[in-house]
Image: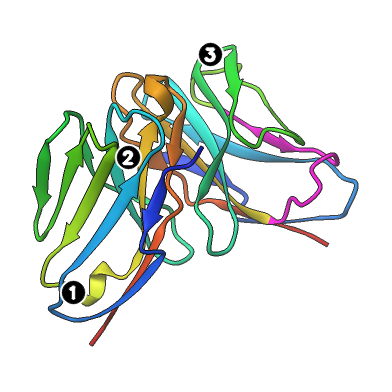
Amino acid sequence: QQPVQSPQAVILREGEDAVINCSSSKALYSVHWYRQKHGEAPVFLMILLKGGEQKGHDKISASFNEKKQQSSLYLTASQLSYSGTYFCGTDDSGTYKYIFGTGTRLKVLA
Amino acid sequence: DGGITQSPKYLFRKEGQNVTLSCEQNLNHDAMYWYRQDPGQGLRLIYYSQIVNDFQKGDIAEGYSVSREKKESFPLTVTSAQKNPTAFYLCASSRQTIFEAFFGQGTRLTVV
């Protein structure tokens, strides 16, 4: 079963912050985040391997709460280039079956 | 340069015909994956392969078939049994130990 992401869509003004959540009904062993521009392939952002781990990438960071089976992606001071669809992904029950979440469409306006 | 190549970029198929989508990688990755993406929807796993000559069904394998005869290649055949094949298809590869996926540019299949 796909991880569920929320919100489904969000519109921001440049400079505003956003949080995207990813929740799984199964145990999470790792979480990875991707961004996809319209009509293009998804691009890897980051991977989180440990419960409670946090990572940052420029003004984009993420947290992973293993106990709650959740991960969150934080976009700070958003830029126009942040627009796209964000996906979380995980290995289904610790196997090599890698599945993606339902996706969150993010649009940043000038 | 290392990467993953999908071809063709656009493909049109008549109903009732089988069609094969190509996916080649030169990243020396063991694992390869096929995903389907419908407008406004997430990525759904069709098939995946961890090693040569072995592959497993994903969540939506019905109407699709794959082969993994070489490490570099993982072609996907969309058969006439697939009821609604029009979609964007993405191939990905990764190291086996840590899933950091590299995606191809995708093939947009349209049934006419």
- SS for dot 3: loop
Which mark identifies residue A79? 1
Marks 1, 3 in one chain: no
Q: Position of residue B82 (x, y in %)?
A: 79, 43
User: Image quadrant of residue A8?
Assistant: bottom left
Q: State yes or no: discs 2 and 1 in contact (Cβ < 8 Å).
A: no
Chain part drawn in magenta: B74-86
Please give the count of numbered marks on the rendered protein. Answer: 3
Q: Mark 2 or 3, which is nearer the eye?
A: 3
What is the quadrant of residue B88 in the picture?
bottom right
Quarter occupied by the C terminus of chain B: bottom right
**Which marked residue is nearer to the observer: mark 2 or mark 1?**
1
Q: Residue furthest bottom?
A: A110
Residue B78 image-quadrant placement: top right
Residue B12 location in percent, x, y? 76, 57
Q: Residue sitting at 19 percent across and 38 percent down?
A: A65
| Residue A107 to residue B20: above or below | below
The residues bearing labels 1 and 3 have C-alpha atoms spaced at a distance of 42 Å
Determine the chain carrying the residue at label 1.
Answer: A
> Dot 1, crowdedness within 10 Å: few (<14), some or many (≥20)?
some
- The secondary element bearing badge 2 is classed as loop
| Amino acid of disc 2 | Asp
Alpha carbon distance from label 2 to label 3: 23 Å
Q: SS at mark 1?
A: loop
Above or below for A79 versus A102: below
The residue labelled by disc 2 is B1
The amino acid at mark 3 is Val
Q: Residue placed at 36% from the left, 35% from the top?
A: A90
In contact (CB < 8 Å): disc 1 and disc 3: no
Residue named by callout 3? B52
Check the residue under mark 2 and report the chain it is in: B
Sequence-wise, the earlier of marks 2 and 3 is: 2
